[in-house]
Image (spheres, helix red, strand yellow):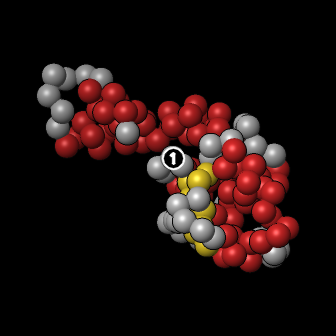
Amino acid sequence: MLTWGYTACDGPDEITPANVEVAIPIAVDELDTGFFRFRMGRTTNAERDYLAAMASLGSGPYSSGDVAAEMGKTTAQVGPHRSSLIKKGLCYSPRHGAVAFTVPKFDDFLRRNMM
């Protein structure tokens, strides 16, 4: 991601593995406090619960049924939340009956901050 590259370049003329190692926690913090938090600010509590259920299942894409089951609900009960998250651009459907995050590392953010 651009944030990693920018953070690793903020210093010497040459990017070294050591620069990248130093940049990782800085880049993660910048993404968490800015980019990811902004995206979360656009969600309702029910949508946050849906996102947290997705992230709790590990890496995606996720079966819509598995997300619903993780929430203790049916797919019909959580369908409106899924649909709203897709409209907001936080998720997409890579195939019928599946859902995934649109942004890489968003699941990691959710696991760090919601679980």
Q: Is 110 in front, or is 95?
A: 95
- Counting the numbered discs, the total is 1
User: Which quarter of the figure is the N terminus placed in?
Assistant: top left
Q: What is the three-letter code of the residue carrying label 1?
A: Val
Residue 48 appearing in the image: no
45 sits left or right of 61 in the view? right
Residue found at x 59% / y 40%: 36
* Furthest residue in direction front, as rendered: 96
Left or right: 74, with 1 as reference point: right
Tell me residue 14's x, y (percent): 14, 28
User: The C terminus is located in which quarter?
Assistant: bottom right
Q: Residue at x 66, y 49 (%)?
A: 86
Residue at point 32%, 39% (across, down): 22
Query: Residue 25's quadrant in the figure?
Result: top left
How would you rate the neighbour count of disc 1 (Cα within 10 Å): few for under 14, some for 14-19, many for 20 or more?
few
Residue shown at 82%/74% (left/top)?
73
Residue 90 visible (yes or no): yes
For the residue pair 94 and 33, the one nearer the viewer reads as: 94
Can you give x and y, in whole percent of width and height, for residue 57 in the image?
59, 71
Side of 3 where 59 appears, left or right: right
Residue of label 1: 103
> Could you tell me which secondary element the residue under label 1 belongs to?
loop
Residue 80 location, quadrant: bottom right
Outermost residue to the right: 77
Toward the left, the furthest residue is: 14
Q: Nearer the viewer, residue 9 or 89?
A: 89
Residue 94 position in % (x across, y down): 53, 61
Q: Is residue 100 above or below residue 45?
A: below
